[in-house]
Amino acid sequence: MRSILKSLSTLLCFFTSIPLPRKLCSSTEFRSLYLVPLVGFVKGFVVAVPIAILKNYLSLDVAIVSSIAILLHFSIQGFLHVDGFIDFSEALIASRFGVDPYKVVKDKYRGSYAIATFSTYILILYTSIYTLTKILNPIPLLQLLVLSEVWSSIVFLVLPYIAPAPPNGLGKKFKDSVKFVDIVMGIAIAIILTCILTLCTGNPMKGFYIVFYSLPAVTISTFITYTLSMRTLRFVNGDVLGFAFEISYLLTILAYVATVSTWI
């Protein structure tokens, strides 16, 4: 149990901005990576609980609540994944004009491509979360915001396993640590978390629907990211993983919006 808790704390330090004691964040050994969905669960609650409270008790305007949800989604990850999304998006567009995508990924100065892709992403994400926040009651809204983080985290297991590693850095170390059993157990944990969260509300069929809609979103985002990264960088590094996570998160939210009648 102590080993599992240590592995979970290492992953929380790596994937979130939660202020844990420094001694818990000193390790860079990635073990028990099947626990990644639990990290998503923690992140999801940090995002969803304040949103449910704001919607139910303070009756804030839906536009404000939706904006806070996006801000919390970015803040709890320390803007890590969205930074990767921006970098890799710019590299993808720049590579079409003969620019070395690896240099673009490593360039700390963002250009017009980064602004364009991030603005488009924010617009679609905001509209989607706004729709869910406006239509749903606090409990189903909390469920979907939490589980969207849980299911999106699966890409952190699948993509590194199937793609070549970067030449160096933590991305290579993370890639070398992912095993097939981590993927199987990670998906199993995501399913269990989904069942627990939906059974608490007395509607087990919601769990089935969430799994049914979430798995294709994760699969599609993994396939898209893998294809794009192989055409440009030829490997998957941290920026590519951040891109995959944000795409998976967006597609998961969009899947919930498309089937919003299921959650009412």
Image: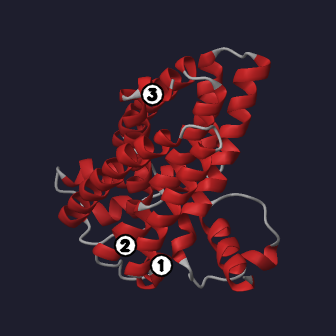
Is the residue 161 above or below the residue 247 in the image?
A: below
Q: Is residue 144 left or right of residue 54?
A: left
Instruction: Give the Cα distance between marks 3 and 2.
Output: 28 Å
Give the x, y percent position of residue 160: 37, 72
Residue 177 in view here: yes
Q: Residues within 10 Å of mark 1 (few under 14, many from 20)?
A: many
Residue in the image at 59% along x and 31% along y? 141
Query: Label 3 sits on what residue type?
Result: Ser
- Circles 2 and 1, Cβ within 8 Å, touching? The answer is yes
Query: Label 2 sits on what residue type?
Result: Pro
Question: In the rendered view, how is the structure colored?
Answer: secondary structure
Which residue has dot 2 on it? 160
Q: Secondary structure at mark 1?
A: helix
Give the x, y percent position of residue 25: 72, 75
Q: Secondary structure at mark 3?
A: helix
Which residue has dot 1 on it? 174
Q: Which mark is residue 128?
A: 3
Q: Is residue 86 left or right of residue 79?
A: left
Instruction: Give the Cα distance between marks 2 and 1.
Output: 8 Å
Q: Residues within 10 Å of mark 3 (few under 14, many from 20)?
A: many
Which image quadrant: the N terminus?
bottom right
The first of marks 2 and 1 along the sequence is 2
Q: Is residue 75 left or right of residue 264?
A: right
Is the residue 56 above or below the residue 107 in the image?
A: above
Q: Quadrant of residue 29?
A: bottom right
